[in-house]
Amino acid sequence: MKTFFSFLSSPRFLAALVAVLLVLSFIPTSNGPALEVIFSNSGLGKVHEAAEMHLEQQREQALKGFLLLSALKVGLAVLRSSEVGFILNVRIGDLAVAVYDYVNFAWKILLAAVAYYYIVEYLLKLSAVVNVWFLWTALASIMAWLLIVDLRPGNLRLRSALAKTGVAASVLAILLYIGLPLSFVGGGWVSAHITGEPIKEANRLYEDMGETMPSLLDGKVQTEKKTDASDIQTSSVTVPFPYDGSNPLLVMTEPQNGGGGRTGIFARLVSGEKLGELKDYLEQRSRALASAVLRQTAAYIFNIVLFPLLMLIAFYLGCKYLISLAVMK
């Protein structure tokens, strides 16, 4: 029995085993190299499928929030660039500045999140193509190292070079085959159990705001005036009567160049009640919006950066340590 185990652990037997694996990795099949097909049927394929499904789900969720915020951002941007005049010129955009800043910040975060999920999807597909190269390098280096150990044990420099090459290639191959997709699967688990709810709540808030936010710019154009650009002194209008909260107010956008040296001024009449309704709505929603944006941002940072990075670092260090023990002994 002792002789049998000694044979199994001998460099020649291990080199022959690695040579068989190397040959299998070169045999082509309809689904790729034979060794990769064996890995896939042993459960690795399910890990890749789960990683792709997670990335698709998270991308669609981020894209949904991005589109909702885009609609909000357009409405708030129009409002922020508008003016209302009564006695003194008052920018109604000042009422929307804080809300617009929250929306704009969240919009940038979700834009980055959508881009990230597309990038890592391409990265996952790229790893499925190049991982076999690292597998070939690892198997060839380990087989050569085992043969050198058995046939020329005194050649320490070549043994050390082959051992280091084998360790590096093996670690990279394991990371590409298992570590990378497993980090995305772990990110899916974290999203489903920890960070997913804040993201969904924020998207529901964006959707609700898009449906319920009062708009000052829904009506048709009441007046339109064309004049020379040189005649324009200000884009503000003063309503010549005291403002009591119910009289019509004149809301105008900034002057726009219409070509041919002409500038157009586009104005709409709205009521003071509408302005007050919008002010109250923005004040009530600003706190909830700030909380939702910050929680969603923290969730995406954890999903996109912290958890995958920590998982890959732990996987890399663990694989490197175990393989080094096996090769360097």
Image (cartoon, helix red, strand yellow):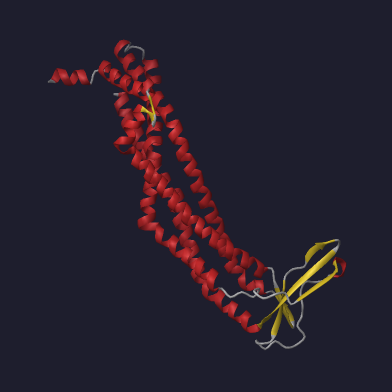
Residue 147 % position (x, y): 32, 14
Residue 81 % position (x, y): 69, 68
Q: Quadrant of residue 278?
A: bottom right
Is 265 located above or below residue 70 in the figure? below
- Foreground of the two, 198 or 150: 198
Q: Residue at x 86, y 61 (%)?
A: 260
**Is residue 235 shown left or right of residue 19?**
right
Q: Residue at x 46, y 48 (%)?
A: 305
Q: Is residue 108 visible?
A: yes
Q: Is residue 163 visible?
A: no
Q: Residue at x 40, y 58 (%)?
A: 196
Residue 34 % position (x, y): 35, 27
**Is residue 83 shown left or right of residue 43?**
right
Is 41 located above or below residue 52 in the figure? above
Task: Pick out the residue farthest to the front.
Answer: 30
- Foreground of the two, 58 or 194: 58
Q: Quadrant of residue 2?
A: top left
Residue 63 % position (x, y): 51, 55
- Foreground of the two, 122 or 153: 122
Task: Pick out the residue farthest to the left.
Answer: 1
Considering the image in quadrants, where does the N terminus appear?
top left
**Is residue 2 shown left or right of residue 129?**
left
